[in-house]
Image (cartoon, rainbow, N blue to C red):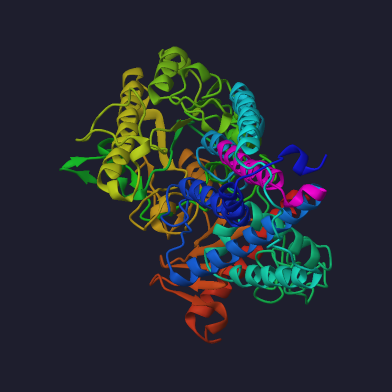
Amino acid sequence: MRFDTIFPRASAAARSAWTRAARLTLPATILVTLIVELALAERKYGLFGGGFGQSRALDAPLETGAFLAALLACQILLFVLLYRLVRRLHGRQGDSPLFHFNFAFWIGGGAIGLTVAKFQALAYFSDAMSLQIVRNLGGGSLVDALLYTLSEAGLIAIAALGAACLYALGWWALRRRWRGAPPLPDHYRFGWRGGIAAFLAVALLLFAANRVDDARSALSRFNAVQLFGAILHEATDFDRDGWSLYSHPIDRQPFDSARHPYALDIPNNGIDEDGLGGDFTFSGGLPAERAPVIAGRKRNVILIVLESTRADALGKRIDGIAVAPNLEALARTGSAAPAAYSHVGFTTQSLHSLFTGELAPADGRHSLVNAFLANGYRVGVLSGQAEDFGGTAERVGMRRGDLFVDATTHREERASVFAAQGSLTIDGRVLLREFDVRLGERRAWDRPWFLYVNLQSAHFPYAWPGMDRILPGEPLPRREIDAANRDRLERTYWNAVAYNDRLIGELIERLRGLGVLEDTLIVVTADHGESLFDDGFLGHGHTLNDEQTRIPFVLSDPGIRFAGPIGLADMRAILLRAAGAVVAAPANDGVFQYLGTLDRPGAIGLVEPDGRRVVYDLYREAVQGSDGRWTPYAELPPQSALRASADDVIDRWARERWLAHLRANR
């Protein structure tokens, strides 16, 4: 049916209005969809201002310019292509109000709807994952997240019905307002040469933007960039090894599938597979270790892990009030490591290292659980988190013991509204109650216990209903957490740490009342630290610094000596030696650290035996020394101390990866 039979007449004013509106359809659709996506991305990721879990922000003119240029180019090209496609599908009505209405409603409105749905799903998933990156955490409950979002199916149906009603209303208004509108010339026509030129321009802008710090990370959040980036990645992955001219890091050996970023460097073969530090040299194999034997008197061992707790909790004062008086008292009468660190800023990997003494254990054969069970101990778990998250319980054998209480077994008493596995937490008082029920009588201690206790209060957002107010001030609501409220945020966080310390004190008093305290080794540490905007960042797992990785390590036994900085993987040997086992002391060779996973880190670092930290950023190919300044690796003089330290970090990473490879294949 011809358009002029549907809309038979139109006034001169209507024709003029139609001409103006039709000319603006494409640019207006591009602009509105871009503004909506920018607003949602800024709200979730803090592209321009940062936020919890975000270490990359567009805070320099070059970064912002590269980001906007590439984003605009991708957005414009995508919608121009869609415009041409939809116009062609409309045939002879391509110059009518119907085409422009359908394009604006279904393409523009549909793009906005899909973007909103995407960010809504990401919001659910992120909350379920405690705002952490699932890949880096090494675990995640996608099923839980999807089940959670399915609870909104009714809202989705309502939204679909509303869209249908809006379309019908728009169609009616279109017929009434713009009858008989004249055909409009095609203002956005271009030939195949123009299309190729536009695509090449997008390719060049994306390639350039990917070389700019933080611009690449911000661009990766946007639909048009993801689409063209995926196309360009596939087109330039010439050797089909998963890396290309548009991957990050870039593939500098695009025609050799054995050589690419993050390739496992095979030692002593004369080939530098990952392109870092030359060929890796290695001799020997996995260190041999016999099962630890605890001879003589077997004491109880209680390992307490504090969530997101910084090392400066020891000695911290708020308005003259000690944040951790019980931990400080334990350190005074016992031993405290001057410098202890997590290897990575995520809970699951940290616990795996703590329990097994390995950075990336392939199994739990060296787990503390197995060691204590083999020595006749009872094993118990009292954890405020879901220990199945990331496979921790299975990896280290937590359910092999006599007692297992965690946030999953007490899901109905969770401290937050989220029920997905990665966000489950229960108050430490629930754990103390279960301690009283299971271990509250002296006869329960007729055999020695290895007891693992995990206290979650200091996890973001650092407060929940029922948490004791120990320090002055009211808790900062989650919606108000930002850099502008840093002082209140710090008080909220330190109160959560103080609450955990109070729970430690109450546990110690229970042990004293049972008459077993003097026969118990107490060990307290943390999975990682926490930045509180003191380094411009909130959270953990994105920067290798003291705020996010330096942690307390306190033992109730006095006289334990520490030769240098220690990592979580070193603590297994220290704990076993304190318990009476004959095991080798950890080597004083510094603490290796990484962001992400051991096989795919964003940065690697080493806290050297003298306490200095050197970090190599694999994305930026830059090195940070102890002075905090970044220097491109290529600009370091070959004989400089910083170049030697950077090479040590790269070699240590290759060594740790090779050891993990050997463990996985033994």
Question: Above or below — where is 506 with respect to 126?
Answer: above
Is residue 627 found left or right of 425 in the rendered image?
Answer: left
Q: Quadrant of residue 160?
A: top right
Quadrant of the drawing holding the N terminus:
top right
Residue lying farthest to the left in this orientation: 320
Q: Which residues are magenta?
A: 91-120
Who's the residue at 51% across and 46% down the image?
40
Is residue 664 found left or right of 121 in the rendered image?
Answer: right
Front one among 645 and 243: 243
Who's the residue at 42% across and 43% down the image?
308
Question: Above or below — where is 463 with respect to 646?
Answer: above
Q: Main secondary structure of the magenta part?
A: helix
Is residue 384 found left or right of 165 in the rendered image?
Answer: left
Q: Residue 375: horizontal and vertical position, in percent?
A: 59, 31
Kindly tell me whether residue 11 is visible in this rendering: yes
**Count of numbered circles in the view:** 0
Q: Residue 544: horizontal and vertical position, in percent?
A: 47, 59
Residue 44 located within the stretch drawn in magenta: no
Front one among 132 and 189: 189
Question: Above or below — where is 412 with respect to 325?
Answer: above
Q: Residue 235: horizontal and vertical position, in percent?
A: 80, 65
Question: Above or below — where is 311 with respect to 143?
Answer: below
Kindly tell me whether residue 374 is visible in this rendering: no
Q: Quadrant of residue 496?
A: top left
Residue 99 located within the stretch drawn in magenta: yes
Front one among 450 and 75: 75
Q: Residue 411: horizontal and vertical position, in percent?
A: 52, 20
Front one among 601 and 444: 601
